[in-house]
Amino acid sequence: AVARMTDTVTRERPGDVNLTSGLWNRRRDLRAVRRHFGSSFGDDGDGSDVTISCATSNVVLCVGYTRVLLGDHGPYLELNPASVLWENLTKVAGGGDARFYDEWRVSPELVRGGVGD
């Protein structure tokens, strides 16, 4: 069998406009999320058993998510703090008084130590 380029394309489905408000960047992000999590993403379902890993190191970040938000700056995962593997993360210092969120990254020793290889 010959594979076609369109075999791996995640197509838009009826009702997607409700998830993306019809905006081109959110449509693009929804396709990317579906490629990563599977084409059934966005259906009524439960994300509690989905393992989420760092894209560059494969270190597991959490198991499960509450929802995916399609924002102006890309997709964001909303997580339950109990599902996060905090031992695999390091808090990034700084950001100033105006920052309203905490930034966490994969712990450098896990990347260098070969855990994600």
Image (cartoon, helix red, strand yellow):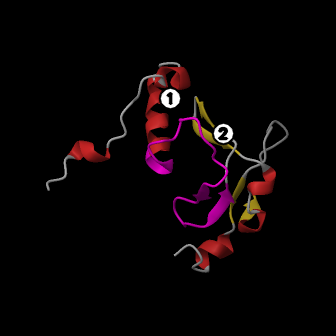
Kind of residue at disc 2: Arg
Residue 69: image location, x then y, percent: 63, 34
- Magenta part of the chain: 35-63
Q: Mark 2 points at which residue?
A: 67
Regarding residue 117, the answer to whether it shows in the image is yes
Residue 34 to residue 113: above or below: above
The label nearer to you, 1 versus 2, is 2
Residue 14 to residue 63: above or below: above
**Residue at point 53%, 35% (across, down):** 43
Mark 1 crowdedness (10 Å alpha carbons): few <14, some 14-19, many ≥20: many
Kind of residue at disc 1: Arg
Residue furthest toward the left?
2
Residue 21 to residue 94: above or below: above
Q: Which of 108 and 6 is in front in this view?
A: 6
Residue 91: assigned label: none
Decide whether residue 58 is among the magenta residues: yes
**Residue at point 51%, 49% (across, down):** 37
Q: Mark 1 points at which residue?
A: 26
Residue 89: image location, x then y, percent: 72, 63
Number of numbered tags placed on the structure image: 2
